Image (cartoon, rainbow, N blue to C red):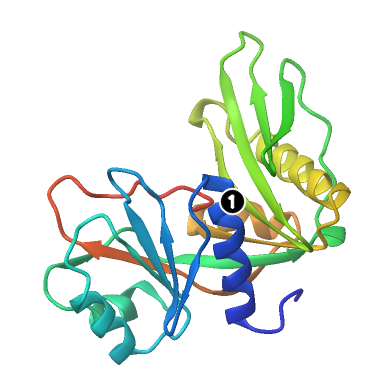
Amino acid sequence: MPFKTTEEALRAWVEGWAVSRGAAQPAPKPWGFAVEVGLPREVARHVVTAADEPTVRKLAENTAACGIPLKVCVPAQTLKAWLPPGWVLLAGDAVLMAARLDAVDAPPRLPDGYRLHHWDRAGVTRAVVRAADGSFAARGQIAVTGPTAVVDQVETHPAHQRRGLGRVVMGTLAEAATRQGARAAVLGATEEGRTLYEAVGWQVVAPLSAAAREAGDFRSRPGPAR
């Protein structure tokens, strides 16, 4: 495992995620990190490294606004039991995962009829696979922050799944981060995404759950890499 502790991996994830999404520099707090995101549905997020019930409950009770989710390295049902009334889980069980980049599988050959495009901008490498007609097939991105990197926004269109496109994207991103000096990487994944990542060399570090103050129109659609 490239990280000695869960807190170390979580810190790397928060730093890289903020770069990947163009969010503000994470602000250290006694309980973890606060990140200004600046979106209507996610104004900010609180990432809790001190994962115990009193800390989570106090933070939730002091968070009055919707659109400020909590991210905590505990199972979803544990987080649910810690939350005060008015809070809901945003997704099911997810996990924090890590890998040594030299242990991640190299990208396989792209299937016939697909084209891979990748580019670097503002510290983030993006990879997109397009189908023969030019339509979207798969994508992902990686942000490098010194010796570590964060994989983010990985998805494959349902019409193009089970063709190895996710492996192509993951291998391409790992190679790009390695060229930029990163040695280890971390990501947040749903159970669906976990299957792909484990197959290409990633390991589970800890559970990763999310919740937010309840509102009629605030829900997060879970994706393979969060």
Q: Is residue 222 left or right of residue 14?
A: left
Q: Residue visible at 52% across and 30% down?
A: 157
Query: Residue 165: percent from the left, percent from the top?
Result: 68, 34
Q: Residue visible at 83% across and 46% down?
A: 175
Q: Is residue 16 left or right of residue 66?
A: right
Asked whether 116 or 43 is in front, the reply is 43
Query: Residue 167: percent from the left, percent from the top?
Result: 72, 42
Choose top left, top right, bottom left or bottom right for residue 72: bottom left
From the viewer's perspective, is residue 139 above or below residue 30? Answer: above
Q: Residue furthest top?
A: 133
Q: Residue visible at 71% across and 77% down?
A: 3
Please count the marks in the image.
1
Q: Is residue 99 left or right of residue 21?
A: right
Q: Residue visible at 54% across and 54% down?
A: 18
Q: Quadrant of the N terminus?
A: bottom right
- Badge 1 amino acid: Val
| Label 1 SS | helix
Return the residue at label 1.
Answer: 19
Q: Is residue 92 left or right of residue 213?
A: right
From the viewer's perspective, is residue 191 above or below residue 8? Answer: above
Q: How many other residues sit within 10 Å of disc 1, few (<14), some (14-19) or many (≥20)?
A: many
Choose top left, top right, bottom left or bottom right for residue 149: bottom right
Query: Residue 89: percent from the left, percent from the top?
Result: 27, 64
Choose top left, top right, bottom left or bottom right for residue 88: bottom left
